[in-house]
Amino acid sequence: MIHDYLVEMLDARLGDASICPSETARLLGEDLRVEWRDLMRPIREVTARLADQGRIEVLQSGRPVNIREARGPVRIRRKGWMRPAD
């Protein structure tokens, strides 16, 4: 369920727009009627697996990071997005 939710949220974003794991947790928590903070660890675990598969990248301060090592806020976006040249 978390996997599908993350993918749907990314699909709903335009271009290289990213999502925040806590944003995902809050929305999913509302749907499941659970405390969003309880979803943060599972969301980070699913995010790590998606990153391992090369489907997404995790950013911190705009730079790619390993979510298993990152501390603090991160953003998630589709991997391989190329910004159009000006």
Image: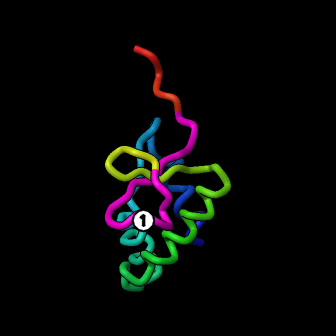
Question: Which of the image's four quarters has the N terminus?
Answer: bottom right
The residue positioned 48% from the left and 62% from the top of the image is: 67
Picture layout, residue 19 above or below residue 3: above
Question: Residue 51: which quarter of the image?
Answer: bottom right
Visual colour scheme? rainbow
> How many marks do you count on the picture?
1
Question: Residue 53: which quarter of the image?
Answer: bottom right
Q: Nearer the viewer, residue 25 or 61?
A: 61
Does residue 55 belong to the magenta stretch?
no
Does residue 78 belong to the magenta stretch?
yes
Question: Residue 24: which quarter of the image?
Answer: bottom left
Q: Nearer the viewer, residue 66 or 73?
A: 66
Give the main secondary structure, helix, strand or loop, of the magenta stretch: loop
The residue positioned 32% from the left and 65% from the top of the image is: 72
Q: Specify the farthest residue to the right.
A: 53
Q: Looking at numbered disc 1 in the image, what kind of residue is underneath it?
A: Thr
**Picture coordinates of residue 16, whole percent (x, y):** 45, 38
Image-based side of 86 in relation to 68, left or right: left
Picture layout, residue 52 above or below residue 77: below
Picture layout, residue 75 above or below residue 25: above
**Picture coordinates of residue 46, whole percent (x, y):** 57, 68
Question: Which of the image's four quarters has the C terminus?
Answer: top left
The residue positioned 50% from the left and 58% from the top of the image is: 66
Picture layout, residue 16 above or below residue 74: above
Q: Specify the farthest residue to the top.
A: 86
Q: In the rendered image, which residue does mark 1 sit on?
A: 24
Q: Nearer the viewer, residue 1 or 78?
A: 78
**Picture coordinates of residue 81, whole percent (x, y):** 53, 35
The residue positioned 48% from the left and 48% from the top of the image is: 77
Q: Which residues are magenta?
A: 65-81
Q: Nearer the viewer, residue 77 or 36?
A: 77
Secondary element type, mark 1: helix
